[in-house]
Image: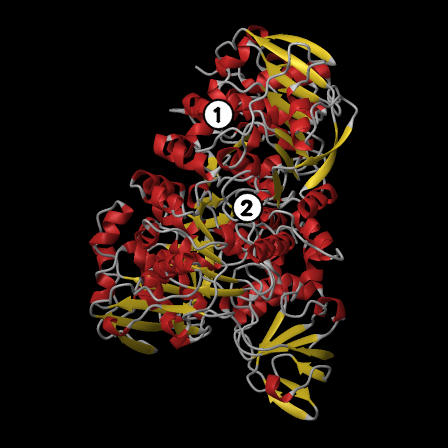
Amino acid sequence: MDRFTGKIWVLGDDIDTDIIIPTEYLALKTVQDMAPYAFSPLRPELAGQIREGDIIVAGKNFGCGSSREQAPEIIKALGIRCVIAKSFARIFFRNSINNGLLLIENDKLQSDVKEGDEITVAINESIECRGKQYPITSLPQNLVDILNAGGLVKAMQRRNGLV
Amino acid sequence: MGSTIIEKIVRNNIGKEVHPGEIVTVNVDRVMIHDIFIPFVASKFEEMGFTKLWDADKAVLIYDHLVPASQVDDTRHFRIGNEFVEKYGMKNIHRSDGICHQLMTEAGYVKPGDIVFGTDSHTTTYGCVGAFSSGIGYTEMASILGTGTLWIRVPETIRVNITGKLPPNVMAKDIILRLIGDLGADGATYKALEFTGDTVKNMTVVSRMSMSNMAIEAGAKCALFTPDEKTAEYCGITLTDKERDLVGDADAQYCQVIEYKAEDFVPVMACPSNVDHVKPVSDLVGTTVDQVFIGSCTNGRLEDLMAAAEVLKGKHVAPFVKLIVTPASRKIYREAAANGTMAVLAEAGAIITHPSCGLCCGRTGGILTDGETVIATNNRNFLGRMGTSKVNIYLASPRSAAACAVAGKIVTLD
Amino acid sequence: MGMTIAEKIIAAAAGVASVRPGDIHTVELDRLMSNDGTTHLTIDMYRNLKNPRIADVDKLVWIVDHNVPCDSVKTAASHKKMRDFAKEYGIRFYEGAGVCHQVMMENHVTSGELIFGADSHTCAYGAVGAFGTGVGCTDYLYAMVTGKSWLLVPETLRFNLTGKLNDGVYARDLILSIIGMIGANGANYMAMEFGGEGLKTLNMSDRIAVCNLCVEAGAKTALMEVDEIALDYLKAHGREPKHVFKSDEDAHFAKVYEIDLGAVRPIVAKPHFVDSVVDAKECVGTHIDEAFLGSCNNGRIEDLRVGAELIKGRKVHPHVRFLVVPASAEVYRQALAEGIIDTFMEAGAIVMNANCSVCWGSCQGVIGEGEVLISTGTRNFKGRAGHKDSFVYLASAATVTASAIRGEIATADMIS
């Protein structure tokens, strides 16, 4: 689990939450219902192309915009293993951790890679692509705890004695 | 060493000094949940194993994104919300009174120094009265409803100091758009903004609200103004010493200080499709306009409607151009009806809707199609936000927007 | 043999001395109204014609009213198509001015005209003695290109009105009672003609409400005798009548009904048919989720006044969404000036811009699965106001407002 390899999809800067999931589809009943519309304003075909275990590599300020938690949930539902970006917007960052979606900050990778490349991620250590290593920093302990619990719902269930 | 406003608020909340970068758990004074997310909050809350709210009186539920319902499943959100309110004994619910952020301050749910979280990114708005308020997702909201607490990382602060007198036709919206343009869409990510200087001191609370509302568009965690007599009047309170002390100390540590001279501001617009893509209106003159939208939690208040009415009085919206006006709250609508503003807008040909998020949230209220251009007073112009990805959204002040409606193209106010 | 009003209008439009029911005539049309429900389809067909032309652009009136403000990218595209076409050809164009039939009554229709509207409730124009009838977009296109169309001369049903409506009983109760009496197909292909002493007790708003709903009995058109009240209305709106026709003494009617207005009682049409009418009292206590005061049928100033008077100083029931939608921008401005808008806002209603709103079941205030709406709209067909499994009751402005206050179907006399 600490190391995985996946094919990448490359996106630009400022991928906002309206691109990740337009408001029009936000009142659909489940995240599964919404998932086909992910990224539709930018790349309508993308949601259908993503396969389990793929990785998104993006520019700065990924997930900026609204507090809609469907954004990370949908990315996770599409099978994305993790998102690597130059930087993340703060609400999206919290929402991702709370839903167990791994986010990695790296400001070099996006400019070096091409869509379709395979990369290998060693959690809390480094990313490897085309033989090149990219170091990554580790997350604060309180976030690791939430991730390890399997997200905030599970952490709260533990607190409330349900598990 | 001194403290910034956010450091003081957090210190007062947890009872010990804090420094940027520290992760602390705060006690939440108020939470706001809106209609889009209540079904998710409700199900996560129960899934987490909670059986009662930590404090029912501290929770506020507001229907605004889906009012009036535009899709057949929308009313499901109202049903689930009503059931949640009843089951857990909530009293603070607004079913058609306006936009959540307007109601939170207008109805007195937020006071200076409070720590408030909402399931909406524009929760930063309440910084206009000196409250630390920020947007979160529905899972965290569910956990606050059960525990009354949330972890936060104490943010660094960027101080924005503005001095001098604003030129005529420049509104608070022009200032915040310029700042976002200068900072970039991620220029304040994870950070607090603190506004100081005589220009903001002389502003109404409502103008400050337009600025704190949009701070998120630079990525900010919150945007704070020092509470003053205007704040006290707006909130209907007398300021305590603790509230008066919510001012950045002279020796406080700021990660960045930005200075502006008020005289240097000009009317601006955020051009498609990023909020930080800001240009002077004078550079955009002549662009054809299909629709104008005046409303939202950024610019749907009485002073905004009055500013628009001043421009529109005795004039008519250009042929084939739509002007959609969506007041931010029921109270504002009634005030605008009482003081004649609504009559001026209606005479000018405005389409006046019930207070709600309207077009800003892109579900209804004036959706556009390929090649069309809208001048809007709200907070976001993201790709596809108001229709197809080929709609051009320009963000502007109510005054600029009204002038464009009359001209049918982008014009300067002079 | 003499002719009815409908026959006289057709004869004049066909340029012949007389017509008889069952004849088919080519007629010259005075006006062609089309709205955003179907105009985009008409434009598509027009663009496919070999030699497209518009016979007389001055006869065309296009109105965007069904989804205002626009609610989806699909609608936005059809609105744009309509707007661009209107701009290109110089067609009289309204957007946001209100529901098409109300806009037509306020600005265009006059007595004796023959009008096609690409909307079934075009029969409303009979209130000023104009022959208005709803057509599909193919018929509309033909008329737009040629300025003409063919019409089968309808039989006429005559309604002689006597007496006067009691307090608390409205024109809407009258027409719903009539539809209940003759059935949803009781006037199929026919004209419904209204006259008699009782007509004088009905104001223009009442008359529009009556004529507008005649299509729910299947009528091709509805026509009222033109009197001082109608002529005053036209004058106030700056128009002259084209012809003022009255049925001849010896005109042939398929059937004559005598209607005592004093005998009409508050009525509710139950789901899912307009002719499924009962005494409103029979529905009292039925739970509702939403109430709607508006539409081309009942969204005029007179209707809003009825609602406002009832709700003043009271509140909308917390679990009810009460939508108040003026039929036109002119009605809105009048209501604003009279303080009526504020009365509704103070009571907790949702006051929308002038448009078709939930009567059309799209865009504004749609109801969800299993929900119940009481409405002053035109139709209560299954699924009309939103989810396919939802329920619409039709009633007067008074009954709708009373129900909004109580949270269940109630009549105005129950509000004290």
**Considering depth in this image, is B368 or B162 the residue closer to the camera?**
B368
Q: Position of residue A81 (x, y in %)?
A: 69, 72
- Left or right of residue C383, residue B308 in this image: left
- Left or right of residue A132, residue C319 in this image: left
Residue flagged by tag 1: what amino acid is it?
Answer: Asp
Secondary structure of residue under mark 2: loop
Q: Earlier in the sequence, mark 2 or mark 1?
A: 2
**Considering depth in this image, is C27 or B376 the residue closer to the camera?**
C27
Dot 2 falls on which chain? C
Residue hosting label 2: C68
Which disc number belongs to residue C303?
Answer: 1
Decide: is C401 above or below B121: above
Quadrant of the image for the N terminus of chain B?
bottom left
Are tags 2 and 1 found on a single chain? Answer: yes
Q: Position of residue B412 (x, y in %)?
A: 35, 67
Number of numbered discs on residues: 2
Quadrant of the image for the C terminus of chain B?
bottom left
Secondary structure of residue under mark 1: helix
**Considering depth in this image, is B19 or C371 the residue closer to the camera?**
C371
**Considering depth in this image, is C157 or A4 the residue closer to the camera?**
C157
- The answer to whether residue C281 shows anywhere in this view is yes
